[in-house]
Image (cartoon, rainbow, N blue to C red):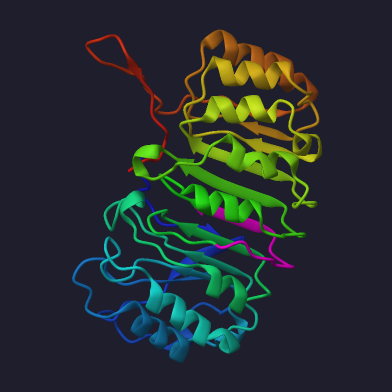
Amino acid sequence: MTIGGHLKEFHGLPAFGFPGVDDPVPDPSSLPSPESVAWRVAVDSYDAPEQWEDAFARFLAAVDTTRVRALIVGAWSDVYENAPDEVVGALVAARDRLPALRALFVGDIVMEEAEISWITQGDMAPLLGAFPGLEEFGVRGGNQLVVPAFRHERLRRLRVETGGMPAEVVRSIAASDLPALVDLDLWLGTSEYGGDAGIADLEPFFAGTRLPSLKRLALRNSEIQDAICAALASAPVVARLEELDVSMGVLTDDGATALLTGQPLTHLRKLDLHHNYLSEALRTRLLETLEPAGVEVDTDRDDAEDDEDGDGEVWRFVAVGE
């Protein structure tokens, strides 16, 4: 699976693409009210007629940004080789013009623009520091991604989507102080695309001591999904979760059995395991064990398919890799 469509909503608001440079100059009266949508500002990823920061300048001139609550950064020029340093700089420079900003997503880029593991990312620290009022932050792409350990008082949702998340990013997030965080969503990816985090790097998430408000934990899209589930089977954080998401990865009967035979999961509102490599017997066992307790269980195999080579070796794949 690849990412084929842009975000349709963000922070509970419908996404709205700000007109491009070749579109008619927007009449402010024809645009949505600033607080009613998540504004998406983007340029062409190949041969762009303008740079992202120029598109953003047009956005600042056309919209009352003091009322903007959510902003989506789409493609910038040549995302496959250029880090978004100018994008980050433009956003930080405009922080005083965005006092109501509560949600920011960097890299709403689909496969026609750049595959997720070909997106060149950068240092997110300036953004996290410039917007202390953020409640939601997301970023897509792990290539050259930097997220230093940080403290943020108001951040409630953090989502990092990659086809391969560097271990240093995992460790930095694990070391961050996020007292208000209720939803952590990490797409860990594969070693082929730089996802070199191991179970030891994830231990702080299992303990949950730095995330006192956490209610949803998603450690997914991983080639070590079985090992993650084995660790979660006795992880202290699970007892206070409402939702556990171990979807999109290489989850087999070994990992699912570890979850079922570990600590009780009947307190969960939802257990998401979609895109998996489970047997029908294990799938049935999960549903029969947890659904009577009121747990919503997603065991949909989706497009997960085994691939056996001529030597009899079976290959399994995460949902989003390259």
Name the spot of residue 284 as percent of width and height, x first: 61, 12
Q: Is residue 143 visible?
A: yes
**Up/down of 236 relative to 132, above or below:** above
Residue drawn at the location 70% of the way across and 38% of the way down:
206
Q: Who is closer to the viewer here, 46 or 7?
A: 46
Name the spot of residue 275 as percent of width and height, x first: 48, 29
- In the rendered structure, the answer to whether residue 47 lies left or right of residue 62 reads left
User: Is 149 a magenta residue?
Assistant: yes
Name the spot of residue 63 as percent of width and height, x first: 50, 86
Q: Is residue 35 visible?
A: no
Residue drawn at the location 70% of the way across and 14% of the way down:
288
Q: Who is closer to the viewer here, 125 or 40?
A: 125
Furthest toward the bottom, the residue is 61
Residue drawn at the location 31% of the way across and 51% of the way down:
115
Which residues make up the magenta segment? Answer: 148-160
Q: Who is closer to the viewer here, 277 or 263?
A: 263
User: Is 113 a magenta residue?
Assistant: no
Name the spot of residue 164 as percent of width and height, x first: 42, 45
- In the rendered structure, the answer to whether residue 26 lies left or right of residue 22 reads right
Magenta: main secondary structure: loop
Where is the C terminus found, in terms of image quarters? top left
- In the rendered structure, the answer to whether residue 111 lies left or right of residue 149 reads left
Q: Quadrant of residue 78?
A: bottom left
Q: Who is closer to the viewer here, 37 or 125?
A: 125
Where is the N terminus found, in terms of image quarters? top left
